[in-house]
Image (cartoon, rainbow, N blue to C red):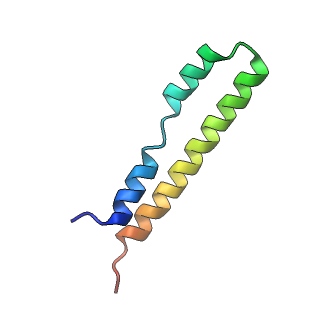
Amino acid sequence: GVSWGSMAGAGVLAGIGFTMSIFIATLAFDSADALATVKLAVLGSSLLAGTLGTILLRVASKPAW
C-alpha cells in the first residue's frame, strides 16, 4: 500500500510546475526587473518543492524497524 508519507511527498513534488509559471509570467509582466524577480521566485520555489518532496519520499520509504 501507499503510506501517507509517500502521498505527501508526491504531492509536494507536484509543486514543481515552473515551465507554465514562467510562461505566464512573461505574458503578465512587461518590466524586465519584475520578470527577473518572478523567474527567480518560481525557480526557487521549484527547487524547494523538489528538495522537500525528495526528503519526504526518502523518509517515507525507510523501513520502520
Left or right of 54, for residue 60? left
Q: Position of residue 50 (x, y in %)?
A: 51, 50
Split into 4 quadrants, where in the image is the C terminus? Answer: bottom left
Q: Is 61 situated above or below 64?
A: above
Q: Is 18 situated above or below 64?
A: above
Left or right of 19, for residue 33? right
**Front residue (pair 64, 11):** 11
Q: Where is residue 45 in the image (x, y as percent from the top left)?
A: 60, 43
**Front residue (pair 2, 63):** 2
Query: Residue at left 58%, top 50%?
Result: 48
Left or right of 38, for residue 48? left
Query: Residue at left 44%, top 48%?
Result: 13
Query: Residue at left 38%, top 52%?
Result: 10
Left or right of 29, for residue 8? left
Q: Position of residue 8 (x, y in %)?
A: 40, 58
Q: Quadrant of residue 23?
A: top right
Q: Is 39 situated above or below 10?
A: above
**Front residue (pair 54, 45):** 45
